[in-house]
Amino acid sequence: MPAKKPEDIILKKSRDPEGLPEVRGFDFSKEFDLGRFLQSYATTGFQATNLAKAIDIVKEMRKREATIFLGYTSNMVSSGLREVIAYLAKNRMVDVLVTTAGGVEEDIIKGLKPFLIGEFAGDGASLRDRGINRIGNIFVPNDRYIAYEKLMDGFFRRMYEKAAKSNHTIGVSEFIHELGKETNDGNSIYHWATKNDIPVFCPPLTDGSTGDMLYFFKKKFPDFKIDISDDIVRINDIAIKAEKTGVIVLGGGLPKHHVINANLFREGADYAVYLSTGMEGDGSVAGATPEEGKSWGKVAARARHVQVEGDATITFPLLVLGGFARA
């Protein structure tokens, strides 16, 4: 057998795959056009191409009138994504919201007093002495929580009285619906969710400042209860009765799982878009891909799906711009 030439070993004969587009980025030498700029992501490569795919999937969700579930962790509301989510709720562009305790209370707190841009390198002990809490590079002074406590003290009493009069236990989604009436802030997610009757699900409602306040309230009124069992029926029924469903998830944890688990009851979501910095290697929910969801039946076998790896504070506004606002 004749020896192979070195060039044949290093560069084997190739043939271009059929139908694949060329890699090409945006040409800034031409007049700027936002639509062309977003379209250029499709041929840029790496996560830009995944983001372009996510925009296309969201457009299809909306075209097919899929019931859209949006799940997000509390730090998304800590950030300026709060206003982006509020935009979707205001314009009835999503149908179901799922979040954590912080994802509810921080929206309401911001309607009382804003959060502040600080720095990641803030000294923890020094900030503690000054009564300032840090979320990444976002600062939240304690007086925000004091203002929230004043609001919630009266709200808890009204909920307690309402439950007593109607002789039923308040559910979590009902609790959040009523809480949305407590703010007229046009940038509030739950102001618009309440106005537009968009259900909000938050199984871990006690895991935050709201839980701290509930602790003190129940010391005075131990018979006050909030029920989570009605909501699992409600969210699962929404998924089961939907013609088609699409899920958009920012981050991981409970909101992500709660969204896709509801879709298990209909043999999986038809569309799935995940925005996350999570790694799959540790088996975390944040890093779990749509393919893993398929193995559980939470994402449909033939679903259109994509996972965009990156900070959602960067990727989600672009997704909303291309998939919702411009569409």
Image (tube, rainbow, N blue to C red):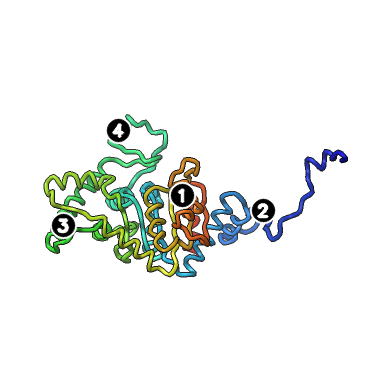
| Mark 4 to mark 2 CA distance (whole Å) | 50 Å
Mark found first going from the N terminus, 4 or 2: 2
Q: CA distance from mark 2 to mark 1?
A: 24 Å
- Of marks 1 and 4, the one in the foreground: 1
Residue denoted by label 2? 23
Q: Earlier in the sequence, mark 1 or mark 4?
A: 4
Question: Residue 87, position in %: x, y?
Answer: 39, 60
Dot label at residue 312: 1
Q: Going from the N terminus, do you reach mark 2 or mark 3 first?
A: 2
Relative image position of residue 109 (x, y in whole percent) = 28, 49
Amino acid type at circle 4 is Arg
Q: Viewer-proximal residue, 287 or 77?
A: 287
| Rendered position, 198 above or below 148 | below
At mark 2, the secondary structure is loop
Side of 95 where 300 appears, left or right: right
Question: Can you identify the residue that label 4 sits on?
Answer: 128
Which amino acid type is marked by label 3? Arg
Q: How many marks?
A: 4
Residue at the image point whose x is 78% and y is 45% from the top = 12
Q: Which mark is residue 156?
A: none
Q: Count neighbours of disc 1 (C-alpha within 10 A) and say few if under 14, some if 14 to 19, many if 20 or more.
A: many
Q: Which residue is mark 3?
A: 158
Which element carries disc 4, helix, strand or loop? helix
**Relative side of 157 to 325, left or right:** left
User: Type of residue at label 1?
Assistant: Ala
Most foreground residue, 60 or 77: 60
Q: Is residue 236 visible?
A: yes
N-term mark: 2 or 1: 2
Residue in the foreground of this view, choosing between 147 and 204: 204
Dot 4 surroundings within 10 Å: few (below 14), some, or many (20 or more)?
A: few
Alpha-carbon span between mark 1 and mark 4: 28 Å
